[in-house]
Image (cartoon, helix red, strand yellow):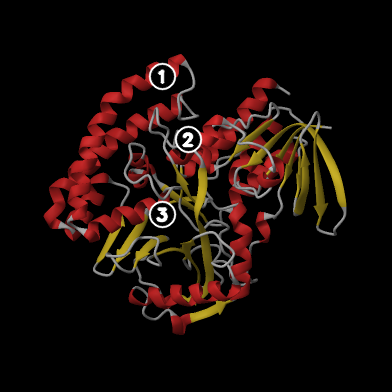
């Protein structure tokens, strides 16, 4: 019997498994899909997650995790981007530089009538980002849970009040400038895990992502996944993938029935379980049961949008010379950002190791679609793929004639597989007491815990890492 079973394909599950194994616990990670298999052809490779990653700077979350796991620094594989990303509108292009003054000057060039307000916004955002980072460091669960936590939280109250006043004033400015409004909406869509927490206090943590740094891996984001699996196995942990979870039986011990790639089934048992909140196996565990915690009932997280990505192998001449590695393209400044109006691009440019040749590149184009069988039918996804290429025409007018490789069926397959890996967009209610979008790792079962980005949505991508660290801390503290 294992000390711990972790079920999940996402990064937070890999983090939790690697950490617990590193502290000497007998850990097994059950991942239904092997992340290394998501490659479309021998000539073109695509990242498993085509969205920006942050937190790899000095003293930031991800490097701190690697240090705790004693994983050698990966600076040689992890590259800082400048600009961090671009946002493209029909009449504007904004380069989000790493230096605050450079970014403010860039935005003032595009929106000179709002130059003073833009500078004030980023000056204030930097201050609030520092406060949130300090809070996050001292309170990794984000929401307060003890008397001391609430005493600390009270010290933030004056800043929350000031933020609400500033927010109302700035939103009034955006209401009168739809193009500038779409720039900020596109940035939140690029970096945030939620769709309805526009410009709350913690949003400053996302607005300042360019200053904290956006990174990409030359060998793909699988680099980090593989490093965590190797660390798990080096500490005598077990990695089971690909396999399917057939059943989860709560008890003492917990029993998980799995089926391997050949169809053979077996049962593994463990003293405790960590389950990814992204996993569809949540339905198995909680089927027929009441809401498993009061906080989950009070602040539910429901999937609002799921990523759909098409993978294109292109001739590099169709890409603008100064195109960033990450780009958010907005087609119409007067439409809702999620109404067929946003495309996120990730380009593996010719100098990257993923590129097959000097005149070729891999281009992933992602949009976010509602959940539901009708939306995710083959017919509708084929229409969405065609729409993505058509909508890119104003930005990449020579794209169509320079597409060298496109396998629609494979893109659809990978997009569906990736729903357990890539963070979707959640619809969440902030806590009535604190205003934070955060949920506990606990489930109401004494030996079962959750992990996943939705638990710490206010922390953006780094919330995915922290959630795995928090879940593992509970297990390690108890030493099973």
> Which mark is nearer the camera, 3 or 2?
2
- Front-lying residue, 195 or 389: 195
Tag 1 or tag 2, which sits nearer the N-term?
1
User: Badge 1: how crowded within 10 Å, few (<14), some, or many (20+)?
Assistant: some
Tell me what residue is drawn at x 65 percent, y 21 percent: 477
Element type where label 2 sits in the image: loop
Q: Can see residue 324?
A: no
Residue 151 sits in which quadrant?
top left
Q: CA distance from mark 2 to mark 1?
A: 15 Å
Q: Is residue 386 above or below residue 50?
A: below
Crowdedness near tag 3: few (<14), some (14–19) or many (≥20) residues, C-alpha within 10 Å: many
Q: From this view, report whether residue 90 is shown above or below residue 106.
A: below
Where in the figure is residue 238, as x and y percent of width and height?
77, 41
Q: Which residue does the image show at 59% across and 56% down from the upper left?
A: 419
- Specify the quadrant that holds the N terminus: top right
Crowd class of label 2 (few under 14; some 14 to 19; many from 20; radius 10 Å): many
| x and y, in percent, of residue 282 in the image | 66, 44
Q: Which residue is mark 2?
A: 438
- Front of the two marks 1 and 3: 1
**Which quadrant is the C terminus positioned in?**
top right
Label ID, residue 190: 3
Q: Which residue is mark 1?
A: 150
Using the image as rendered, state which of residue 472 and residue 160 is in the foreground: 160
Q: Are marks 2 and 1 in contact (CB under 8 Å)?
A: no
In the image, residue 389 lies at what x, y percent?
44, 76
The mark that comes first in sequence, 1 or 3, is 1
Q: CA distance from mark 3 to mark 2?
A: 19 Å
């Amino acid at each position: 019997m294992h000390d711990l079973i972790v079920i999940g394909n996402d990064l937070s599950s890999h983090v939790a498994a690697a950490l617990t194994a590193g502290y000497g616990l007998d850990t097994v990670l059950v991942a239904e899909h092997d992340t290394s298999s998501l490659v479309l052809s021998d000539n073109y490779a695509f990242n498993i997650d085509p969205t920006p990653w942050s937190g790899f700077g000095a003293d930031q979350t991800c490097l701190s995790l690697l240090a705790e796991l004693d994983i050698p620094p990966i600076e040689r594989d992890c590259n800082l981007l400048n600009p961090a990303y671009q946002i493209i509108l029909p009449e504007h292009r904004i380069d989000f530089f790493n230096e605050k003054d450079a970014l403010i000057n860039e935005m003032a060039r595009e929106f000179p009538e709002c130059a003073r307000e833009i500078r004030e916004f980023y000056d204030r955002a930097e201050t609030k980002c520092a406060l949130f980072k300090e809070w996050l460091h001292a309170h990794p669960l984000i929401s307060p849970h003890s008397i001391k936590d609430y005493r600390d939280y009270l010290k933030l109250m004056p800043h929350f009040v000031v933020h609400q006043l500033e927010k109302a004033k700035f939103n009034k400015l955006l209401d009168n400038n739809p193009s500038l409004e779409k720039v900020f909406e596109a940035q939140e869509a690029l970096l945030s895990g939620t769709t309805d927490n526009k410009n709350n206090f913690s949003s400053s943590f996302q607005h300042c992502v360019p200053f904290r740094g956006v990174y990409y891996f030359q060998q793909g984001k699988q680099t980090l996944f593989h490093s965590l699996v190797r660390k798990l196995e080096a500490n005598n942990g077990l990695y089971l993938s690909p396999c399917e979870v057939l059943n989860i039986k709560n008890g003492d011990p917990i029993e998980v029935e799995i089926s391997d790639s050949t169809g053979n089934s077996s049962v593994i048992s463990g003293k405790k379980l960590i389950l990814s909140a992204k996993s569809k196996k949540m339905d198995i565990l909680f089927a027929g049961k009441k809401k498993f915690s009061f906080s989950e009932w009070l602040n539910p997280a429901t999937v609002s949008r799921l990523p759909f990505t098409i993978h294109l192998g292109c001739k590099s001449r169709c890409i603008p010379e100064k195109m960033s590695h990450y780009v958010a393209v907005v087609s119409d400044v007067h439409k809702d950002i999620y109404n067929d109006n946003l495309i996120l691009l990730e380009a593996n440019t010719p100098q990257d190791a993923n590129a097959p040749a000097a005149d070729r590149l891999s281009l992933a184009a992602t949009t976010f679609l509602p959940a539901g069988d009708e939306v995710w039918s083959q017919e509708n996804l084929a229409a969405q793929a065609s729409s993505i290429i058509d909508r890119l025409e104003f930005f990449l007018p020579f794209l169509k004639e320079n597409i060298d490789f496109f396998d629609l069926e494979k893109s659809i397959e990978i997009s569906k597989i990736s729903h357990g890996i890539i963070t979707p967009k959640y619809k969440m209610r902030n806590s009535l007491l604190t205003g934070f979008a955060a949920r506990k790792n606990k489930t109401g079962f004494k030996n079962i815990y959750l992990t996943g980005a939705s638990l710490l949505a206010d922390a953006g991508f780094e919330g995915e890492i922290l959630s795995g660290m928090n879940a593992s801390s509970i297990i390690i503290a108890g030493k099973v």
